[in-house]
Image: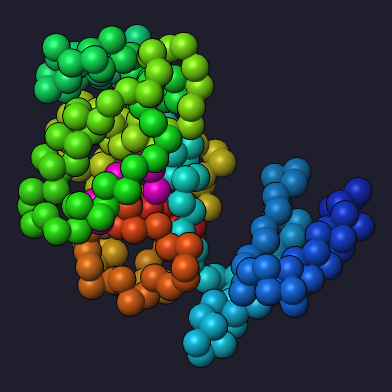
Amino acid sequence: MNQLLPCQGIETDMENVDRIMQQGVRDGIFPGGVLCVWAHDKVVFHRAYGVADIRSNSPVTTGTVFDLASLTKPLATAPAVLKLVDMGRLSATSLLCDVLPAFRETEKSDIAISMLLCHTSGLPAHREYFRQLSAVPEGQRNSALLRMLKDEPLVYRPGSRVVYSDLGYMLLRFVVERAVSLPVQTGAVLPRPRIVQGVARFLPVWCMMTTPMRSAGSTVMPACLAILPACWGSLWNCSPYIRGKGTGGCFPE
């Protein structure tokens, strides 16, 4: 159900944003979407636009599930790392090779956890590893991805530049898993910061496999091919889908 709740000083601006969203659908910029705005500790605007599936013209609702894509980095992976730092299980100044010994005696041996968090590790922005990983048996994808990351040449000296990097957060996912000895998809160490409460749930991977996508709330994307038909759109990112990584795969509640 569409909602437009009063909040002093916001109604007029939201009306303008509402018109822009409607215009975006009419102009074919995007087929559909949901806009939700919080202010003063409450929802002040929550409205759905357009269609969720252009093949059936199914309308978007305020409960439609969207991939949060790279928001997984600040909403799941980075908080998990920081939680482990707070627990004393990790140090931001620790070297990657201290946590993942496979990176010792490589050009990545001087990369610190903080560099991965801040995109200053020297790793490139993006690689389509999923193309190779899709041909690898599921049980071997973890080790195959780790080898790819270890063998990937750096593109600049660690700490000398900022380059937004998916690869750095792929490595952070391995760091988290090594620190807690559990797959990141279980959400075992994912904290519940205030911004996430009531917005996203991080459920065990089996919830996604046994619960329809529409009512699953949120999860870290499982490597479960059975749900692919539920994932539509030309912008769908297959990379976290192939192997639940720290770069994408969270879904909003």
Residue 104, percent from left and from top: 14, 14
Q: Residue at x 30, y 57 (%)?
A: 241
Is 154 placed left or right of 63 in the picture? Answer: left
Picture quadrant of residue 88: top left
Residue 164's place in the image compared with 241, above or below, is: above
Q: Residue at x 19, y 58 (%)?
A: 134
> Closest to the observer: 174 or 85?
174
Picture quadrant of residue 109: top left
Residue 243, percent from left and from top: 24, 51
Evaluate whether residue 180 shows in this view. no
Evaluate whether residue 158 shows in this view. yes
Image coloring type: rainbow
The segment highlighted magenta reads 242-248
The overriding secondary structure of the stretch rendered in magenta is loop
**Is residue 246 located in the magenta-colored stretch of the structure?**
yes
> Closest to the observer: 221 or 151?
151
Q: Quadrant of the N terminus?
A: bottom right
> Closest to the observer: 93 or 163?
163
Task: Name the outermost residue toward the bottom.
Answer: 56
Residue 157, percent from left and from top: 38, 13
Count of numbered marks: 0
Residue 54's place in the image compared with 163, above or below, is: below
Residue 6's place in the image compared with 232, above or below, is: above
Is 51 placed left or right of 160 in the picture? Answer: right
Picture quadrant of residue 158: top left
Is 48 placed left or right of 27 in the picture? Answer: left
Residue 102's place in the image compared with 199, above or below, is: above
**Is residue 100 located in the magenta-colored stretch of the structure?**
no
Residue 135, percent from left and from top: 14, 59
Q: Residue at x 79, y 71 (%)?
A: 23
Q: Residue at x 38, y 53 (%)?
A: 249
